[in-house]
Image (cartoon, rainbow, N blue to C red):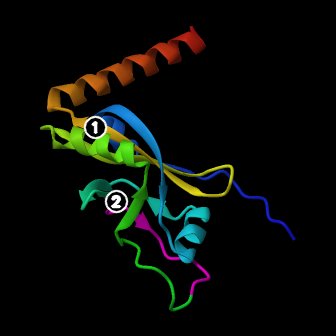
């Protein structure tokens, strides 16, 4: 019996607030069986996740993938470090950008592709200052007020 798969789209909402996102990339992930099953159940969290290079390979740290509900003692470690799969030229480009002061790589979205593969959207980011964050909050409030007034006005 075929089961209907719901749309999996896990976002890092904190990323837009904390960083200016300049470039986005869609990358694959190296996962074990219980991890992909847990992602399909929607048990993932990207809030404190970040990416770092180790020996010319990109790895994601602090990405929480909860334990699979029907997993046994073979279940995975929720906070284990996972390898990100990108093309070599993209990795070189990102590596050179990260060496510049203030740039970092953060995961922004985790989703299941049409082929059923787990994909991670990562972004090259530059940290916001406190006044930039206040400006973002103010713009969001103004937009919400304008939308509210437009509906009822």
At 57% from the left and 68% from the top, the residue drawn is 36
Q: In which quarter of the image is residue 134?
A: top left
Left or right of 100 in this view: 3:
right
- Measuring from the top left, give residue 60's x and y in whole percent: 34, 59
Comparing 144 with 92, the one in front is: 92
Q: Name the residue under label 1.
A: 125
The residue segment tinted magenta is 60-71
Compared to residue 48, the image places residue 135 above or below, namely: above
Who's the residue at 47% across and 65% down the image? 30
Residue bearing mark 2: 60
For the C terminus, give its image quadrant.
top right
Label 1 Cα neighbours within 10 Å, binned few <14 / some 14-19 / many ≥20? many
Q: Name above or below for residue 88 compared with residue 20.
A: below
In the image, is residue 66 part of the stretch drawn in magenta?
Answer: yes
What secondary structure characterizes most of the magenta part? loop
* Residue depicted at x 56% and y 61%: 42
Res 49 label: none
Residue 63: x, y in percent? 37, 62
Residue 153 located left or right of residue 107: right
Q: In this view, does 112 lie to the left or right of 131?
A: right
- Front-most of residues 152 and 124: 124
Q: Measured from the top left, where is residue 96 in percent x and y?
A: 22, 41
Q: Which residue lies furthest to the left in this view?
A: 101
Tell me where residue 145 appears, x and y as whole percent: 44, 17
Judge whether 113 appears above or below 69 on screen.
above
């Amino acid at each position: 019996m075929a089961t209907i798969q719901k749309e999996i789209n896990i976002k890092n909402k904190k990323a837009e607030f904390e960083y200016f996102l300049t470039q986005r990339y869609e990358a694959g992930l190296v996962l074990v069986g219980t991890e992909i099953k847990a992602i399909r159940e929607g048990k993932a969290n990207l809030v404190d996740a970040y990416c770092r290079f180790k020996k010319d390979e990109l790895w994601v740290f602090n990405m929480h993938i909860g334990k699979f509900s029907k997993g046994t003692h073979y279940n995975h470690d929720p906070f284990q470090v996972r390898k990100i799969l990108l093309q070599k030229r993209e990795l070189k480009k990102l590596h050179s950008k990260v060496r510049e002061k203030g740039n970092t790589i953060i995961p922004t979205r985790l989703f299941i592709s049409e082929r059923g593969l787990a994909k991670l959207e990562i972004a090259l980011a530059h940290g916001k200052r406190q006044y930039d964050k206040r400006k973002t909050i103010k713009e969001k409030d103004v937009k919400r007020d304008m939308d509210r007034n437009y509906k009822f006005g």
